[in-house]
Amino acid sequence: MQQALEPLILSWRVPELRNRILFMLGAMIIYVFALWIPIPNVNHDALERLFANSNGILDFIDIFGGGALRRLSILALGIMPYITSSIVFQILTMVFPYFKELQQEGEYGRRKMAQWTRWAAIALTVVQASIAAQAFMNPQIGVLERTPVNFIQTVLALTAGSMFLIWLGERLTEKGVGNGISLIIFAGIVTRLPQQMFELMQTAAFYQIILLVAIFVGTIIAIVTVTQGERRIPVKYPPRQAGRGRMLQGQRSHLPLKMAAAGVIPIIFAISIVLFPGQIAQWYIKTLPAGAAGGAGFNVASAIANLFAPTSPVASLLYAALVMGFTYFYTAVIFDVRDLADNLKRYGGQIPGYAPGRPTFLYINKVLTRITFAGGLFLAGIALLQWWAPTILQLPPSAGGVSTLIGGTSLLIVVGVALEIMNNLDQQLKMRQYEGLVKQMEKGKL
């Protein structure tokens, strides 16, 4: 434990890094306070009934928001519109050459892509806020009274809340430690942990708590092992001439391929698709008149709702298959094997036993396909653990939120962001040690 926290302890002794850490903690405190700023005129009893009948999809969305959606605060939409916009532009760079060339133009291209991502996120936020306001004002739901003033207030409040999170995330990236968007999601998940642990202590038996803790620790170990695991392909570079008649020896390096390069994105995409049909069926049932039970429409909607319930075997198999599919898709989006093979050829790098060009491309692609399959299986298992562990442990319904503690998207994000923070601090420390060494050499102290 001391070795794992050593970068944090050493960073506190460096004034600049200490200021970054304090800025990050201050931003997290502001975020927690903003979670409690409510939207006006909310019927909280109706909101609780909506969550109870949502078939799990609202609870999943609320995982990323620190409980903002359950309270219907101004941060209810969270940072998800910005994440969706970012993913869309990442896909566009793979489909359209213009975006790919822009991404490779250095700082100018990065700023341009960031600006377009922000504008797209604003548009998505307005659309989602309008849809959410209309849904909450539905008489069958009754969370908000159907008036033009309520609609305008809700759309403006939700849009302003998401824009505040985007601004806060960018400031965290600039002045904090690590990616600001990831830190906001991390804070939203961690904020709810004390409440969920308290609910667990109140409702679960002692043996259930012991088993849950064992699964929790085992899942963290597995996530750290897989997310840090990589397949290293050896690469050698030929001797080259430097200066007048001076030859540098050939270098040996390696090409690291991450086992779970796609991260948590496949789980987010997959669960949105799996839970969507059941949620639509539930909303359709709520719009039916009181005497419609037993009719054809009611029976079909009930069958769809049961089929796509989180503990349904069909939904579980579909969920796992979608996670595997999106793992391959998103890995292809963020990892261009052909460009990698071309760059190796351009700079004289060669994988031993494989000629530059197409043979190198085929070999890297084969290795990446195999390790992505293993990573996809792991992500599918982690995702299903969040669904099935509470049922296997026979936890009471009131402790349903405890799934955050044992697997799925939330724990993957928490562990991943914690590792990212430690790695960033470690890199900053190493960079400062190197700079200090250079200054001592310039002063002749070595």
Image (spheres, rainbow, N blue to C red):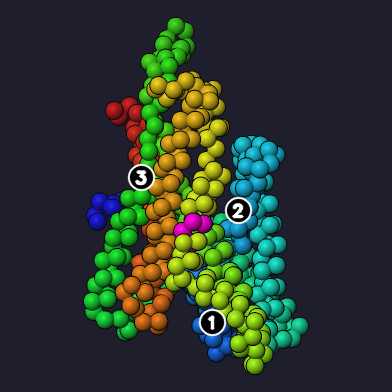
Q: Is residue 195 visible?
A: no
Q: Main secondary structure of the magenta part?
A: helix
Find residue 209 and report its image quarter: bottom left
| Residue 86 numbered tag | 2
Q: Nearer the viewer, mark 3 or mark 2?
A: 3
Q: Secondary structure at mark 2?
A: helix
**Alpha carbon distance from label 3 to label 2:** 26 Å
Which image quadrant: the N terminus?
bottom left
Between the C-alphas of marks 3 and 1, the distance is 40 Å
Q: Residue furthest right?
A: 148
Which mark is on residue 53?
A: 1
Name the kind of residue labelled 3 in the image.
Gly
Of 383 and 43, the residue lying toward us = 383
Nearer to us in this view, 410 or 156: 410
User: Quick one: 312 or 401, which is closer to the camera?
Assistant: 312
What residue did someone put label 3 on?
229
Front-most of 16 and 300? 300
